[in-house]
Image (cartoon, rainbow, N blue to C red):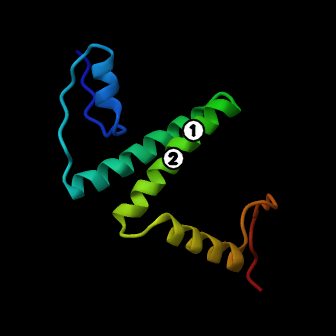
Amino acid sequence: MPTYNKLVRDRIPEIIAGNGKTCSTRILDESEYRAELRKKLAEELHEYLEAANDTGAMEELADILELLQALTAVHGSNVEQLEAIRANKAEKRGGFKERIFLIDVEDA
């Protein structure tokens, strides 16, 4: 029997049961949940970096987006507020669309 000890999506126990298997779960407290969301984000980022093609990359980005939404709620905010912060930073500092790669900066 494999041991996972990791945060999973809400319907995973139901899916496991639908496959005729049983699993053990528990509900995390707030501090555990926050820590596990961060670990899961790192896991999904690693999977994105290792994706072999655009389809795999998009699957991992969808997982990352789901985690960003959960983390936003953990930090007492919502997706609209997160988007407003993103838009404000983009207005002040720009985005990443122009592909600018900074090599170095000399003191004047």
Give the number of callouts: 2
Residue in the image at 34% along x and 62% along y? 74
Taking 91 as reference, is 64 above or below it?
A: above
Provide residue 33's location: percent of width, then percent of height: 27, 52
Classify residue 11 by image quadrant: top left
Amino acid carrying mark 2 in the image: Ile
Q: Badge 2 is on which residue?
A: 64
Taking 65 as reference, is 76 above or below it?
A: below
Work out which quarter of the rendered image holds the N terminus and state it. top left
Q: Badge 1 is on which residue?
A: 48
Provide residue 86's location: percent of width, then percent of height: 60, 69
Q: CA distance from mark 1 to mark 2?
A: 9 Å
Q: Evaluate if marks 1 and 2 touch, with contact meaning CB atoms under 8 Å apart.
A: yes
Provide residue 38's location: percent of width, then percent of height: 38, 51
Amino acid carrying mark 1 in the image: Tyr
Classify residue 97 by image quadrant: bottom right
Residue in the image at 31% along x and 40% along y? 7
Residue in the image at 51% along x and 72% along y? 81
Crowd class of label 1 (few under 14; some 14 to 19; many from 20; radius 10 Å): many
Q: First in sequence: mark 1 or mark 2?
A: 1
